Image: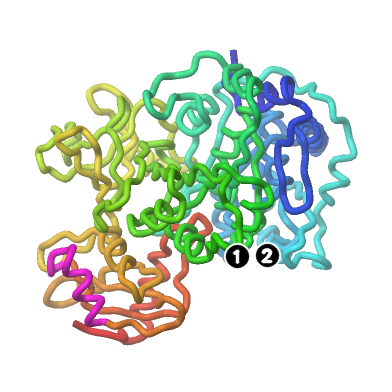
Amino acid sequence: MAYNLADLFEHSVDVMPERVALICGARRVTYRELEDRANRLAHHFLDAGLTAGSHIGVHLHNSIETMETLLAAYKIRAVPVNINYRYTSDELAYVYGNAELDAVVHHRIYALRIAEVLPSLPRIRHTVVVEDDVGGAGLPSDSVPYEEALSGSGDRDFGERSSEDLFMMYTGGTTGRPKGVVWTHEAIWRVLGGGLDFYTGEAIDDEYQQSRVGSQGEPTLWFALPPLIHAAAMMPTFTALFSGNTVLLESKFDADRTWELVERHRVQILIITGDAMGRPLIEALDPARTDTSSLGVVASGAALFSPVIKDAFLEAFPGLLVSDSIGASETGFGGIGFATKGESQVGGPRVPAGRYALVIDDAGRPVEPGSGIDGWFAKGGYVPLGYYNDPEKTREIFREVDGQPVVVTGDRARIEADGSITLLGRGNMVINTGGEKVFAEEVESAVKAYRDVYDAIVVGVPDERWGHRVSAVVQARDGRGVDFAGLEDHVRQSLAGYKIPRLVWVEDILQRTPSGKPDYRWAQGVTKQRDPDHRT
């Protein structure tokens, strides 16, 4: 029995071939059609000399072809590698080289940048170009046209696969170089693909269970808004496909269009990444103009989801289930919390401590519930094999606690008296000011709850007296000015005085990664380029 992502998809094809699998723009593909096209691309890969263990870069924004490429790679036991399509040439050359890519599939809009870096990467011996409607038309490319690559056999004749086949996911690199996290197929399926019960932690022991149960009911319509280059969208999409559901995709995020599509397709589950999508969505919502009554679940993960935004969803949609999951490329699913109105406007998400989630101290010992000690969030159970080509960093975060392998990602956390775990923030984003430690995410949550602020990124700015000063780069709401005195009073109501931003910069737009995470390096750059707009 192989717990393999390609096998799990094929199980759905075999029992629900005529169901719609994916919708993107005006296109709809059934499970049978998706299978046929993925098989054809897989045969093309084999004809190009790619095989088990080959690394195939997926340099694509959201599209049906993105999922076809992933499935085709898994079918031949190759390793698809997610590529952030916003990378500069230098960043792209680093990831292509670090991942040791053998081939790349890309949208035409990225052709010029790819052509710029390929001469320095002789290992890449094959490229395929996908047409797009977001600016790529007419750009030159020497890559094989995608539809031409699909001209071969559509047969499923690829041989036996393994639960130990490899899955690789590069991190966002918001605070450092991107790193490739290597999982086995079984492990990633367990933690993010439905192979574990998310609530009980119990393992599914039947690879046919998801497709069998899915075939017995009507499909659910999922709308995955984040980029498929991130696990926050890729794995929910696979989870939906393993169960015979339908997934709606868009090439880019647009809040107004999202609600139009929710109405048109009767979307039931909306996948988002925190405030970066949640805030523009709630501000674009017009119940008088759009029928969103089909929506039952808003599921967020991978980024800060402020209580004020959760409250807005709960107010707009009585009976809506709003979930906030924690996790990372290195941990997979770490826990899930469900929003209730009136939550504290500060602090990170709180999730139940499961059999695989714990908090450890600096010495690697489990922290007792209710002790008040801040520790490190650790995840046990099914964990990755390590970082690709980075043994030193692998040894740093992949450890043992009580003889069991765990991942310690650098997130600070506290285990409460009731056994729940509160995420405090990234350890490497802690601001030390006058000997006090301040978590950037906690301050961001409070600042973004202020009426004049649309978005905020909090960083530490070096200071001779205090070591660092808590500082905020903010985006004003609707182009209005920021009442700095009012902002300070607002933050002071929920946070201690030493946590209040002492320096504030106002920018027209804040930069975030495609997954919605704050770009802290960009924010630090803003603080170095000019004087602040406000000092306290």
Which residue: 48% across, 26% down?
190
Q: If the image is split into quadrants, where does the N terminus sit?
A: top right
Q: Residue at x 32, y 46 (%)?
A: 340
Q: Is 488 contained in the magenta span?
A: yes
The residue depicted at 46 percent of the width and 60 percent of the height is 276
Q: Note whether residue 178 is visible.
A: no
Circle 2 residues within 10 Å: few <14, some 14–19, many ≥20:
some
Magenta segment boundaries in residue numbering: 484-498
The location of residue 511, given as percent across then percent down, is: 47, 69
Please give the residue where the numbered disc 1 appears in the rendered image.
89
Answer with the quarter of the image where residue 312 lies.
Answer: bottom left
Q: Which mark is residue 225?
A: none
Q: Residue at x 50, y 51 (%)?
A: 272
Classify residue 419 by image quadrant: top left
Amino acid at pointer 1: Ser
Marks 2 and 1 sit apart, C-alpha to C-alpha, by: 6 Å
Q: Position of residue 23 (x, y in %)?
A: 72, 45
Q: Is residue 112 left or right of residue 47?
A: left
Choose between 43 and 188: the one closer to the eye: 188
Find numbered disc 1 in the image and state the secondary structure of the residue it sits on: helix
* Relative to 51, residue 485 above or below: below
| Residue bearing mark 2 | 113
Circle nearer the N terminus (2, 1): 1
- Which residue type carries mark 2? Arg
On the image, the x and y values in percent for residue 267 come to 61, 45
Contact, mark 2 vs mark 1 (Cβ under 8 Å): yes
Nearer the observer, 417 or 504: 417
Mark 2 lies on a secondary structure that is helix
Query: Is residue 46 in sight in this rendering?
Result: yes
Q: Quadrant of the C terminus?
A: bottom left
- Vertical comparison of 10 with 389: above or below: above
Q: Position of residue 452 (x, y in %)?
A: 35, 76
